[in-house]
Amino acid sequence: MAEAMPMPVNMNGLTEFFINSLELPNGSTQIKYPSDSTDFSKVDPSRAFVKKVRRLIVKVGTAVVTRSDGRLALGRLGALCEQLKELNTQGYEVILVTSGAVGLGRQRLGYRRVANSSFSDLQKPQSELDGKACASVGQGSLMALYDTMFSQLDVTSSQLLVTDGLFRDAAFRKQLTDTVNSLLDLRVIPIFNENDAVSTRKAPYEDSSGIFWDNDSLAGLLALELKADLLVLLSDVEGLYSGPPSDPKSKLIHTYVPEKHQEEITFGDKSRLGRGGMTAKVNAAVCSAHAGTPVIITSGYATDNIIRVLQGEKIGTVFHKDAHLWSTVKEVSAHEMAVSARDSSRKLQALSSDERRKILLAIADALEANVSKIRHENEADVDEAELAGLEKPLVSRLTLKPEKISGLAKSLRMLADMEEPIGQILKKTELADKLILEKISCPLGVLLVIFESRPDALVQIAALAIRSGNGLLLKGGKEAKRSNAVLHKIITSAIPENVGGKLIGLVTSREEIPDLLKLDDVIDLVVPRGSNKLVSQIKESTKIPVLGHADGVCHVYVDKSANIDMAKQIVRDAKIDYPAACNAMETLLVHKDLVQNGGITELTAELRKEGVQLYGGPRACGLLSIPQASCFHNEYSSLACTVEIVDDVSAAIDHIHKHGSSHTDCIVTEDSEVANTFLRLVDSAAVFHNASTRFSDGARFGLGAEVGISTSRIHARGPVGVEGLLTNRWILRGSGHVVNGDRGITYTHEELPLNG
């Protein structure tokens, strides 16, 4: 016997309207759901249905349209209109349902009331503004704004105001469909909103007699009436969570299955400004999906989420009538992955130093034994990257040549032969007679490392985590998906069962990163390795400590006393050896005296000979006849650099402090006093004298490998190896000592030999 369709969280008129309007193949209003014996093993969940989308309804809520202070969020509205224009150009039929009129009207009327009130009037309690008046005032302003924005994009929009009762009239519904079809044929974007100014309904949460009672349910109703292929509900969060989105234990639900999630979800408050909220969105989404229109709830704060949805990316929460067929395999949540990594790390720490050493040697052997397999997967990644038009520096970082794999194996063996880092006594103090305190090195716990393009970074970071006893979660760039997967498999296969491969988790979806960044209770450090944008976004998105650097604007300053042949060699290497690296020279500073003796000409000629595009500061561009740099804080990551002339070492130091990134800076000089001034005063993580900036590297520093380079002034700075992934704890050994108000105890605080 067929099972009834599970109803949404709250039954309302829209639900009844949908159910009564459905025309199922058997004439029933019921849908058959699979029994417990159904074999799901061959079902592959996907979002392939977006490929068939032609008619799209987008609903934008009040929380997206307005800021927290009630004013319009013009940036988000602009991004929304640009996305809809792009879809309109591509041939999609786009319909917009918008909220925000009441909020906008309230803001405008509130301002007018203040402007027209006397000081004494303002001291009196202010009555609440009439909601329908607010709607009437705000609607015109909202539509005028949409019309202006779309006109700037060469798109025509139209306004359709509707009320609940109109939908009971079949003639109205037919006319509405005909009008919308005509508008869409003309490539016009219809914009719907409920006409709150003349609505006769009472408070929406008290009156469920209508067909719809907010713009979420209106969007769902229109999806049914206008036969939309997809409904996108834009919210102020990434999608539907299992609990309040602010709760670190809440997880994003990628696919909503009524049987599974209806009883699990805890809904938060309604919308701060509008009628809806997540409860209203889920109601509308479940009804629409039941009627045959898939729905995706996603964030309206991102500038490209609608485009990403239609490209099939796994963002937001999808509602689909066949969703119960997809959710067959239990997904491992970000929280579970992090907890597993912590549990495995504790098992790793329980091993002897020699046992941990053997794991690294086994991984090194496995890498060399699987070179052909690694190369096969990596070449596929490189081919796709080149077809996609990825920039050459990124393709260079992506490529794993045999010699690079051999170098990784060598660095693993170097790490294995290093002194045991865990459990080292850093300090030993006698607090009182027979009361001994020890400061001991220990792992941080669980690391989350997010990196782009470079699959070799996966090997280095995994090796450092194992040597330092830490659990690890890795998220690589999608351009290295195959390379990362094969390397992860090789590494985890070499980890003994008594520790477990879950020590190192590989995060494969970009959408899981927001969940991971909330886990400050189980992840101890985030290390981003990638673009300035990536690092900045991560720093702004998490409470977890972040170790890394956003920029790599490295300088080489050539002083007047420099050996010019040495300077040419250093400058060439700093720029040419690996232009895409974060420790490559981006700015060349030259003492003014080298203009007179021709030194600057020799230096720039050396760079030009290697194909470097030169840009100048105000003093250098005219002298060298080169284009002026757009700014001094510029990380080219390519065969390009900025050149500027400075008066002396003090001016060079001031320039570096003002425009640098505190990464790595170098002076070339034969004057030891000038060199010492530079080394002492330049406040960067690494400062060199007569040596290329390219030496700023964990392997070259003898660290074996590096998890990244940090410009932070807290914890590790510069190339971060094993030591940067350790913290300390205190071990106290006594013989029945008690404080007892410090009576009867004599503190000695005597430093003891570490090995005593």
Image (spheres, rainbow, N blue to C red):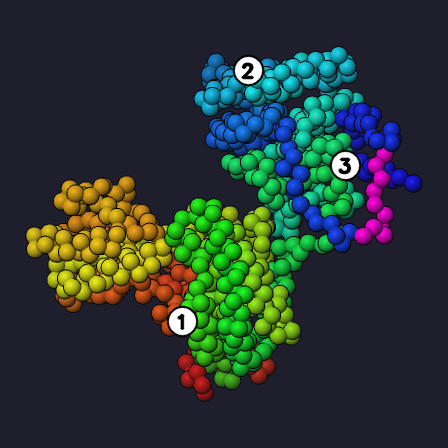
Q: Is residue 580 above or below residue 442?
A: above
In the image, which is nearer the foreground, mark 1 or mark 3? 1
Q: In this view, does 151 lie to the left or right of 690?
A: right
Camera-side residue: 572 or 377? 377
Label 2 element class: helix
Mark with earlier residue (1, 2):
2
35 inside magenta stretch: yes
Quadrant hosting residue 411: bottom left
User: Do residues under tags 1 and 3 come within 8 Å of each other at their CB atoms?
Assistant: no
Q: Mark 3 or mark 2, which has the lower sequence index? A: 3
Q: Nearer the viewer, mark 1 or mark 2?
A: 1
Q: Mark 3 points at which residue?
A: 9
Instruction: Determine if residue 675 is in view.
Output: no
Residue flagged by tag 2: what amino acid is it?
Gly
Mark 1 Cα within 10 Å, few/some/many (few <14, many 20+)?
some
- Residue 202: which disc? none
Tell me what residue is drawn at x 52 percent, y 61 percent: 376
Q: Which of the pair 661/220 is nearer the observer?
A: 220
Q: Name the residue that disc number 2 marks.
A: 140
Residue 749 x %, y %: 43, 78
C-alpha separation, residue under disc 1 versus residue under disc 2: 65 Å
**Residue 703 has which mark?**
1
Residue 512 percent coordinates (x, y):
59, 50
Q: Residue at x 16, y 51 (%)?
A: 646
Near-viewer residue (9 or 285): 285
Q: Under tag 1, what secondary structure?
A: loop
Looking at the image, which residue is at 64% across and 52% down? 249
In x, y percent, where is residue 33? 83, 42
* Percent position of residue 298, x then y: 61, 38
In the rendered structure, which segment of residues is drawn in magenta?
30-39
Circles 1 and 2 in contact, beta carbons < 8 Å: no
Numbered disc 3: secondary structure: loop
